């Protein structure tokens, strides 16, 4: 029996333009809260009748009950079929692949990404469209509008689906296919990479540690790195997805993935280290004694992608988010291909990928990916690195050193000031915006400003314009600072300050990045008045 529920809980705070809804788990547990978002999503896409969707999540607390609700609502809204990962698990890139492979009408992905999980932590839902990518702003804005006016939702009264058993089931008249979360994703990876070569690398004694951070990539990394490619058992650690990610933040950065950083900086480091995040779209790459910044990783992958079978014919172009360092632009210039600068957020790469204008994309926030899906893909990045190392038979340090000798090094660091009161953060940004046009020509802490502006993006494919995407300040001497407020936090505001300093070919490329960036950091602090506005003298996280 379908129930029409009236008087739904309004969804407060879903920002127009954001890819989905991320809130504290208890907020999602309020009666009718999740249901409101799901119904709003179905309404915004013209209804679910006769449609096919993919549903899965990163296994965090509430994942399975939320899936049961979504299935019953999809059935009540007339959907024809839903494909679900076994036990409710699907990494974000694997979900993107399933959406594309099965030519579905989209998918609902349950995750708060790299944010912690648990009843007192974070939960999230987002809708991906039929191309497999995060819904573009037009769709997310209409979902938001729907959430504001919705007065009822439909749900089928039916027993729960058995998420633990693969195969076909039914809920009402809707077909539910429970699939192994890894099989199709692994098959896709086998088409892109030379598994024999990587296997030979491991046989030669090459060692790896992959930290799945108790999150969704555990089963993927175990199946691919250990079972298929022959990395010794125990190479993948923290491999069982847990509802609270073992109490940690499943965020592969030097703060939250300290365990693997410490290992890689120690005398017992393996040849290669990597970690992924809650939903498997982010990655961290390390060599013995060296951390590869995500910006450098994108540049190295772009310069060497042709060494992997999936990219043998070269790449069409490279796109990076605006705060990502200029390192990949330098590679694109040398390769004679186009490079694009987009706003923060993977959804802005979708049109470029769909139009065949770029093959690789990346963000400084540990996101790298290609046209194989429409999400960033943590394990894909690890496999491309391994394929490159298997071809070049060099260490990570060797590959990076060589890269910097050819292109120069973009020293880079992101400083995050978390849980800043929203009023203070907004005041900081509006004060900065008000003086932007006067900054050029001024000098702060010994650095001259060449230009300062607010980034706005004109999408070359659909002509849409996205404004207010962060402030860029360029200094003389090839230094740059970028400032923006996070769009994904769940508590107060997070101020992100991105610092960059170029060291050309021939310069010393082995200095401490924080030392190199001190001048641009000091100048930026004065310009924006971080301490005056936030009371903070130091960031909470430096990546
Ligand atoms: C952060 C990162 C962005 C990233 C976004 C979503 O956004 O800075 O680069 O696109 O998270 O990442 P994920 O899909 O892994 O959650 P923000 O707005 O907090 O800076």
Image (cartoon, grey):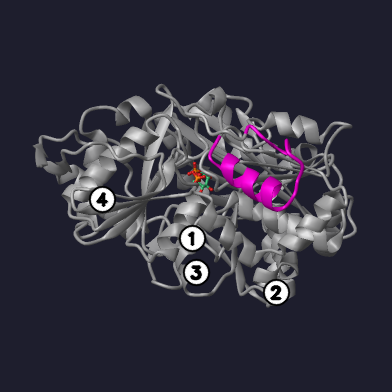
Task: Specify whether 386 is left or right of 277.
Answer: right
For the point 39% across and 30% down, the residue is 423
Instruction: Provide the residue designation for mark 2.
Output: 312
Decide: marks 2, 4 in contact (CB < 8 A)?
no
Residue identifier under label 3: 352
Quadrant in which residue 536 is drawn = top right
- Residues at marks 2 and 3 touching, judged by CB atoms closer than 8 Å: no
Q: Nearer the viewer, residue 62 or 346?
A: 62
219 drawn magenta: yes
Q: Describe the element under mark 2 as helix, strand or loop.
A: loop
Secondary structure of the residue carrying tag 1 is loop
Is residue 353 in view?
A: yes
Residue 201 in the image, given as x and y percentages of width and height: 82, 55
**Is tag 2's residue or tag 4's residue first in the polypeptide sequence?**
4
Which numbered disc flags the more N-terminal residue, 3 or 4?
A: 4
Question: For mark 3, does the 10 Å Cα neighbourhood hold few (<14), some (14 to 19), or many (20 or more) residues?
Answer: many
Find residue 527 and report its image quarter: top right
Q: How far apart are the two marked residues, 2 and 4, measured between alpha carbons?
A: 39 Å
Query: What is the quadrant of the C terminus in the image?
Result: top right
Disc 2: CA contacts within 10 A as few (<14), some (14-19) or many (>=20): few
Alpha carbon distance from label 2 to label 3: 20 Å
Contact between labelled residues 1 and 2, with CB atoms less than 8 Å apart: no
In the image, residue 235 sits, relative to residue 343, either above or below, namely above
**Comparing marks 2 and 3, which lies closer to the viewer?**
2
Q: Residue at x 69, y 58 (%)?
A: 384
For mark 3, give the secondary structure: helix
Region rendered in magenta: 215-238
Question: In the image, residue 519 lies at what x, y percent?
Answer: 74, 40
Question: Which residue is the site of mark 4?
Answer: 41
């Amino acid at each position: 029996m379908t129930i029409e529920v009236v008087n739904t809980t309004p969804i407060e705070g879903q920002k127009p333009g954001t890819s989905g809804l991320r809130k504290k788990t208890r907020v999602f547990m309020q009666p009718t809260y999740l249901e409101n978002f799901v119904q709003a999503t179905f309404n915004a896409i013209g209804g679910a009748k006769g449609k096919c969707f993919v549903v899965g999540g990163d296994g965090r607390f509430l994942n399975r009950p939320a899936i049961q609700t979504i299935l019953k609502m999809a059935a009540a809204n007339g959907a024809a079929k839903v494909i679900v990962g076994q036990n409710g698990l699907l990494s974000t890139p694997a979900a993107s692949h399933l959406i594309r492979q099965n030519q579905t009408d989209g998918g609902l992905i349950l995750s708060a990404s790299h944010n912690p999980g648990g009843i007192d932590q974070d939960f999230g839902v987002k809708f991906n469209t039929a191309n497999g990518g995060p819904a573009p702003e037009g769709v997310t804005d209409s979902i938001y509008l729907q959430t504001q006016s919705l007065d009822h939702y439909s749900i089928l009264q039916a027993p729960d689906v058995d998420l633990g058993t693969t195969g076909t089931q039914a809920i009402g008249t809707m077909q539910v296919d429970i699939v192994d979360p890894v099989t199709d994703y692994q098959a896709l990876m086998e088409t892109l990479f030379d598994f024999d070569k990587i296997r030979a690398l491991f046989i030669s004694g090459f060692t790896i540690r992959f930290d799945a951070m108790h999150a969704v990539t555990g089963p993927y990394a175990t199946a691919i790195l250990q079972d298929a490619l022959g990395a010794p058992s125990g190479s993948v650690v923290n491999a069982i997805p847990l509802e609270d990610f073992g109490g940690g933040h499943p965020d592969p950065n030097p703060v939250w993935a300290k365990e693997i950083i410490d290992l890689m900086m120690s005398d017992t480091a393996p040849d290669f280290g990597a970690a992924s995040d809650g939903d498997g779209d982010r990655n961290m790459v390390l060599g013995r004694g060296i951390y590869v910044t995500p910006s450098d990783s994108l540049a190295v992958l772009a310069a060497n992608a042709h060494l992997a079978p999936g990219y043998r014919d070269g790449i069409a172009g490279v796109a990076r988010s605006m705060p990502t360092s200029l390192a990949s632009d330098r590679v694109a210039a040398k390769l004679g291909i186009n490079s694009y600068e987009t706003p923060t957020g993977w959804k802005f790469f979708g049109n470029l990928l769909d139009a065949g204008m770029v093959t690789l994309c990346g963000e400084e926030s540990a996101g790298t990916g290609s046209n194989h899906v429409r999400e960033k893909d943590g394990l894909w990045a690890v496999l491309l690195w391994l394929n490159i190392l298997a071809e070049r038979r060099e260490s990570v340090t060797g590959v990076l050193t060589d890269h910097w000798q050819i292109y120069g090094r973009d020293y880079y660091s992101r400083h995050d000031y978390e849980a800043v009161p929203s009023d203070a953060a907004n005041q900081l940004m509006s004060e900065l915006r008000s003086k932007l046009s006067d900054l050029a020509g001024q000098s702060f802490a010994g650095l001259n400003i060449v230009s300062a502006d607010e980034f706005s993006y004109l999408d070359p494919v659909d002509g849409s314009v996205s404004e207010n995407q962060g402030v860029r300040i360029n200094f003389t001497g090839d230094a740059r600072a970028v400032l923006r407020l996070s769009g994904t936090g769940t508590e107060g505001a997070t101020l992100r300050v991105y610092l960059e300093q170029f060291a050309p070919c021939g310069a010393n490329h082995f200095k401490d990045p924080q030392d190199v960036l001190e001048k641009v950091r000091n100048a930026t602090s004065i310009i924006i008045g971080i301490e005056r506005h936030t009371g903070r003298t130091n960031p909470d996280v430096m990546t």
